Amino acid sequence: MTEPHLHASHSKVATRLKRAEGHLHSVISMIEDGRSCLELAQQLQAVERAIRSAKQALIHDHLDHCLDAEDEAERAERKAISRYL
C-alpha cells in the first residue's frame, strides 16, 4: 500500500474544491429552476476558476516540495505532473 502523500497546502486545496462543489450544486439547482443562461454561464465560470485555482495550487506545491528530488522515480513524477499545468 502507498504511503499518504500530504502537504501543508492540501487542506487549503480541499477548501477550494469544497467551495467549487458548493457552486456546482448551486448551478444544478439554477438549471432545475430554469434560471437564465447568462446566470448559469457566470456561475459555471466561477466553478471552473475555483477548480483551476485548486489544481494550480496543488501542482505548484508538489513541484516546490519535489524540486530537490534526486530519485529517478520522483523526476518522472515531476515530469508527468507538469502536463497538467
Image: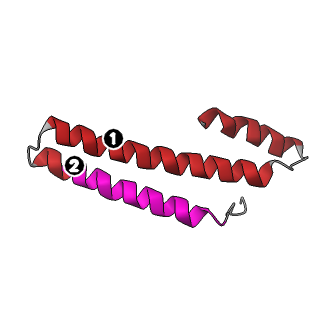
Residue 41 as seen in the image, left or right of residue 57? left
At x 67%, y 40%, the residue is: 81
Give the image location of residue 83, x and y in percent.
64, 32
The mark lying in front, picked from 1 and 2, is 1
Dot 2 alpha-carbon crowd within 10 angstroms: few under 14, some 14 to 19, many 20 or more: few
| SS of the residue under disc 1 | helix
Give the main secondary structure, helix, strand or loop, of the magenta stretch.
Answer: helix
**Magenta region: which residues?**
8-28
Give the image location of residue 46, x and y in percent.
34, 46
Quick check: is 18 in the magenta stretch?
yes
Q: Amino acid at mark 1?
A: Gln
| SS of the residue under disc 2 | helix
Give the image location of residue 55, x and y in percent.
54, 47
At x 12%, y 39%, the residue is: 36
Closest to the observer, 34 or 57: 57
Q: Which mark is residue 28?
A: 2
Quarter occupied by the C terminus? top right
Closest to the observer, 58 or 80: 58
At x 43%, y 49%, the residue is: 50
When the figure is inspected, residue 4 is found, relative to residue 41, above or below; the finding is below
Residue 21 as seen in the image, left or right of residue 62? left
Residue 82 as seen in the image, left or right of residue 39? right
Residue 35 as seen in the image, left or right of residue 59? left
Closest to the observer, 33 or 57: 57
Q: Amino acid at mark 2?
A: Ile
Quick check: is 78 in the magenta stretch?
no
* Residue to which mark 1 is pinned: 45
Quarter occupied by the N terminus? bottom right
Which quadrant would residue 42 be assigned to in this image? top left
Real-space Cα separation, disc 1 to disc 2, in angstroms? 14 Å
Q: Which residue is at the far left?
A: 34
Going from N to C along the chain, the mark reached first, 1 or 2, is: 2
